[in-house]
Image (cartoon, rainbow, N blue to C red):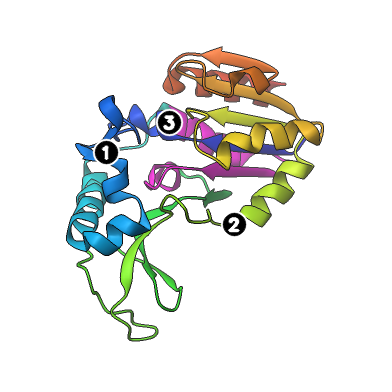
Amino acid sequence: MNIVILTGAGVSAESGVATFRGPGGLWEGHRVEDVCTPRALFRQPELVHRFYDERRAKLATVEPNAAHRALARLDAEWPGELLLVTQNVDDLHERAGSTRLLHMHGELKSALCADCGERRPWKGPLPPASICPDCGAAALRPDIVFFGEMPYQMNRIERALAEADLFVSIGTSGAVYPAAGFVQTARRHGAATLELNLDPSEGSLWFGESRMGPAGTLVPAWVEQLLAE
C-alpha cells in the first residue's frame, strides 16, 4: 500500500512551535502579510529577515514530540511507498528520524538566493543583502515559500497522490492551497482518506474518516494500528 501523509502546524504545536495563524491573524505577534509575502521582503527586509532569524534560533529550544516520533517509526518500518509532505518549516520531522520527507513550504535552516535560485543549509542569522557563495549576488533570503509563490516539488507530490492508496492529513487547517486540495486529488485517484486533527478542518467533509484529538495521541495510535494490520 502506498501512503502519502500531509502534516501541518498542529503536529509541531505540541512541541511549542507557534501555529501559522494565531489570534487576530497574527503570527508570533506579526501580521502574516508583514512577514510572509514578496512585497514584505521588498519593503521591510530587516523585519522579515529578523523574524525568520528568531524562528530559526527558537528551534534549539524545542524537541520532536510523540507525533513526530511515530511518523518516523512508520517511515522506518513501512514496506510500501511512503511520502511525508510537510507544510512546516521546522526540522522536527528530520530530528525525529523521518527520511522519506519533503518540505513544500521551505525550511528555516535553509537560505535561498533570489538571483540564481540556489538553496543551501543555513544555521545562524541571515542578514539582508547576504552574499550568495554560488553567484556572488547580495540576494540571499529565507528559504520560505511566501504567499504568491509556488510550493516546492509539486510535480513529485502530484505523482505520489495519483499513486496513493491512502492519504492522511495531520494537524492542518485545510485553508491553505494547494495543500488543502490534496485530499480531493487523492480521492479522484481512488485513495482512502483519513484526517487526524485537533478540530475539524475546513476540508473535513472531503475525508472518508476523521479522528479528532491531539496529534501526540492520535498519530501514535494510528501508526500502531496500521503496522499491526
Residue range in magenta is: 67-96
Up-down relation of residue 67 to residue 156 (above or below): above
Closest to the camera, between mark 1 and mark 2, is 2
Q: Quadrant of residue 50?
A: bottom left
Q: Earlier along the polypeptide chain: callout 2 or callout 3?
A: 3
Q: What residue sits 58% from the left and 24% below the top?
A: 203
Q: Of 34 and 132, which appears nearest the observer?
A: 34
Q: Which mark is residue 11?
A: 3
Drawn side of residue 187 relative to residue 218, left or right: right
Q: Of 138 and 211, which appears nearest the observer?
A: 138
Q: What residue sits 43% from the left and 49% below the top?
A: 147
Residue identified by numbered label 2: 153
Q: Of 42 and 80, which appears nearest the observer?
A: 42
Q: Amino acid at mark 1?
A: Val
Q: Of 220 and 38, which appears nearest the observer?
A: 38
Closest to the camera, between mark 1 and mark 3, is 3
Drawn side of residue 157 relative to residue 116, left or right: right
